[in-house]
Each structure stands twice: as C-alpha cells, then as structure tokens.
Image (tube, coloured by chain):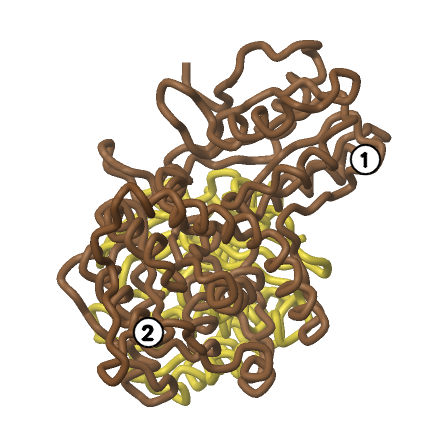
Chain colours: A brown, B yellow
Amino acid sequence: MKKVIIGNHAVSWGARLARAEVISAYPITPQTQVVEELSEMCADGRLDARFLKVESEHSAMAACIGASATGARAFTATSSHGLALMHEMLHWAAGGRHPIVMANINRALGPGWNIWTDQTDSLSQRDTGWVQLYCETNQEVLDTTIMAFRLAETVDLPVMIVLDAFYLSHTAEPVDIPDQDAVDAFLPRRQARFKLDVSDPHAFGALVRPDSYMEMRLQLQEAMERTRDVFDRVEVEWQQRFGRRYGAVEAYRADDAELLLVTSGTITSTARFVVDRRRERNEAVGLVKVKMFRPFPVERLRALLGGARQVAVLDRNLSPGRGGIFSEETRAALYDLPEETRPAIHGYVVGLGGRDVTPTVLDEIIDRTRASAVPEREDVWVGVNP
Amino acid sequence: MREIRFHGRGGQGTVVASQILAAALFREGKQVQSFPAFGVERRGAPVTAFLRMADSPILLRCEIREPDDLVVLDPTLITATDVTAGLKPGGTILINSASSPDHYTDLTRRFRVATVDASDIATGHGLGSRTQPIVNTAILGALAAWSGWVALESICAAILEEVPKRPEANVAAAREAAAALRRAAVAVHA
C-alpha cells in the first residue's frame, strides 16, 4: 500500500509493523507526532503494545531497558534535549546489551533555543554504544525502523534511527507500506537469549570488578564490529523480500569521480540533484552517502574514497573546538591509505540549526574545493552571514 | 517540476490543504513532496505550506523560494505579508476573497489572479465557525477548476481519505467552490 505520509508517521508505521510490545516516551518537538500516532494505534487496537507515558526522557529509556530485560521488544523516540537527558540510560542500554530501537529526530541543542535540524544531538551520543543509522527519505525511515529491530536483536545492541527535523519529520511524500504478513516473516517475535524471569532468577547490572570489566567492553566492541556484516545480511534479506536496499555507505555517480562529496541525511538528496547537474556538464563529481555512523564504516569509506583526488565532507553538526564530526572521522579513517591514493579532505560546516542547504550552497562547496589544491582550513563554514 | 506555496492563518487548515493536494496528485501518478514552513504555528498567525510535484522522483530537500503558484486562504495576508515574494513572473494566485480579481490590480498587472469566496462556501457547509471558517477543502475545489493540472475528482477522493471530520461536507464544499469558479471564469470571458 502506497500512502503519502510524513517522516514521523513513517517511524510510527515501522514500529507498528515491527510489533513493538512496549513503547515508552515523552513528547518533544519535532518528535511528538511519532508517539502521538503510536498512542492512537495502541488506543484503537491496531497495535497490541503497552504504551507508557512517563515523566521524562530519562524515565522513557529506563522503562525501555526494564521492558527489554524481560524479553519484550521495546521502542521509543526523542529529539535533542530529550536525547541529552537520556544520556546516562543510553550507556545502560548498550552496556546491558538491550536491543532497544529508538528514533531520534535531529534537532539543535540550545541555547540559542532552536527546534530545527542539526545532527549534534545524536552525534553527541557517539560513545554510548548505540548503532546509529541516518536516513534520507521517508521510505528509508520506515524500512530502517523495521530492519533496526532485526539488527538489534541479532547483535544484542540498541539501534538509533536518525532523521532530520522537518526536512523528513514533517514532510509528506509517498511511502510504500509493507504488508504485516511480509514483515512478520522478516521479523519474527523476539527470542531473548537472557531475560528477567522469576522462575529462572539471574542478576542484571551487578558490580563488575576490574578483573572482568574490560572483557565486557571488548564484547561490546566485538558486537559493534560484527554489526557491519550483520547489517549487510539484514539488508540483503530486506531487499529480497521488499526490493529496496540502502547500504551502510552508498556511492552515487562515484565512478571515476575526481571530487567526491560525503553526505548524510537529507542533504544527500539535494546533493544528488547537484551532482546530476555537474555530470551533465561532464564534471567528474560524485557523492558518497554515509548511512551508518556507528559502527563507522571505515573499510567501505577507504575503498570508495581512496583514489579520488579530492573529498568534501559536509557536516550539519559541530564539535566545538574540533569542527565537523563526519569530516574528523573520515580523515581518521583515510589516514592509513598510501599517499598516492589518499585524497585531500576538505571539511565544510553547513546548515546548523536548520539553515537551508540549497543547490547554491552545494555549488559553492564544489567550486571552492576544486579551486583549492589543498584544503583552505580543516573546516570551512559555508552560508554564514558576515 | 511545479512548486506551489500556500498562505493562510493558523486554524484555516493550510498545512492540511497542501497534504490533501499532495494525496490528490499522488492518486494521479505524480511524485509529490508536501511540507509546512518550519516554525512554531499559532492560531491566527500567518502559516505557510509548500508542495512540489513532478513526474520523476523529487530530489530537492530545501525550501521553495520561487514558486509557480500561490494559494491564499486569507485575503488579509496580501497586505499584511509579502505573499508574492519569489513568485515567478506570470505565476498564478488563487485567493479566498468575496471580491473579483479586478480588486487586486497590483497583482493582476504581474500575475494571473482568480478569486473564490471559500469562506462563504465553507460556512454554508458548516465547516468551522462563521468567524473562523475552515476553508482549505473549498479552495482546493476551486484550484482544481482553475489550474488544469489536478482533477476535481482526485481532490474529492483525497478529501475522503485525508479528512477525518465530516469528509462528505468537505467534498460538497470543494464541488461548490469549483462550480463557483467556473461560473466566474465564464462571466469574465463573456
């Protein structure tokens, strides 16, 4: 069934088709419509789940952890300050290896108070142990939400689906909504390996001394390493059943490109438009879209970006005192390439706090990169008022 | 690709108008993208919504700055805000107004203008209140009659699909507004 729906409702549909059993959430703009729709689905019986309206995002994640520990499929959604308030519990979810799925609508952190898109909220949670998957279209949002449960429950890690405020959350476009039976065949009920069970008591979250903590962290790291391959397998199966696939990293018109843009989120779509126009003029420009940020797809990026003359990384985020976060990660990933295949990496900070990233902005980035043999600075800010 | 901008006030159903039109065009096989101006809306305050339609997938994910067409749900916005900002030369403006297009000479010099009294039609069908009629479905009916790029039947089917409260009354309002606009067009050409 194809319907014209907003990105927030694509998330709701994904959680519903995945048959989430416990949904615990606290409203925040621009996420609220996700759980508003889910609460209606629960109220009128379209979704058989326990909906918990809690008093804060910290409690929302705590309730998801408790539910997940009993073996239930748990879901929540949040944004910006809500995600920041969850921070402690995010570590708990990952360290406890709870396969919770959460949608985060990228929104800037204040002050200055701002409800518009900016990736710094999710990227600030980089080191919590959550898998992070960024989306470009509402179809990708719905598909990724369902795949996220399969992925999470295979590697025993929580997964965050990330989408841009307004450019996806409040934008309506056609989405192919899969049949429940087909989704059930792809995603059977969760079979938890360990769970809270009064007839088989275990302790969860006990003190772990220095003689075992490192092994637990190593297991977490190894689960992250496995996630790259497991995600590919999950996507292959999704493609076999539903005909769509995205890739942890996607190359677009990248063959023989001298300049490659590296993008994530909705900037990718507008960048495809600009790349198409440049190709019509026989300019060797392509793009690489990064969907998976954690685990970072280091080998894929080396394979795709190695050999290009120049790479321009676009960051709608900021680590103050360092710069764009995707460009920093990309530089580190490519550092070990032999010098003859290692591209010059130009970082650009754009679109913070929802500032529009138009074809004009992207054209400026392409022109400035091509005009500089070496990067002007590590990060150039584009579209900033003088 | 065609780009349309809606101007209304909070409570008139401006954002829903762009979503109903998107659903109608999608029924006709178009690719569509509909979104509100990204802000914090309040009842009575100016609200803007956008729609892109195309035959191929829509790649642009940025705001619409140079629309082809405007739909104005509240005529007081024409003097209160710069509704024609960026409108392409020769673009169209459909206004919810009891006055004839001749009343808007400043606009008719540069653009193609049509009017329909959507407030009166919506009130007649009991949509909203007399002071705050919900005019979105009526003006979409008029748009179908005037534009030539979306069928009235698609609008009516989309209303039945998208409007949860009193969908039949909304369809009747759309049909009446379409008929009113056709009559006005005949009068102009006569």
Is any atom of residue B92 visible in this view?
Answer: no
Q: Is residue A35 above or below residue A269?
A: below
What residue is at 25 percent from the left and 64 percent from the top?
Answer: A204
Q: Secondary structure at mark 2?
A: loop
Amino acid type for the residue under numbered disc 2:
Lys
**Above or below, B2 relative to A154:** above
Q: Nearer the viewer, residue A35 or B69?
A: A35
Residue at 43% across, 34% down:
A355
Query: Residue at 47% of width from left, 36% of height from top?
Result: A356
The residue furthest left is A55
Relative depth, front residue between A243 and B137: A243
Horizontal side of B151 relative to A121 (left or right) equals right
On residue A279, which mark appears?
Answer: 1
* Label disc, if present, on residue B69 of the rendered structure: none
> Mark 2 highlights which residue?
A195
Residue type at mark 1? Arg
Q: Nearer the viewer, mark 1 or mark 2?
A: 2
Residue A346 percent across, percent down from the top left: 60, 20
Residue A73 point in image, percent of width and height = 38, 74
Q: Quadrant of the C terminus of chain B?
A: bottom right
Mark 1 and mark 2: Cα distance apart in space: 54 Å
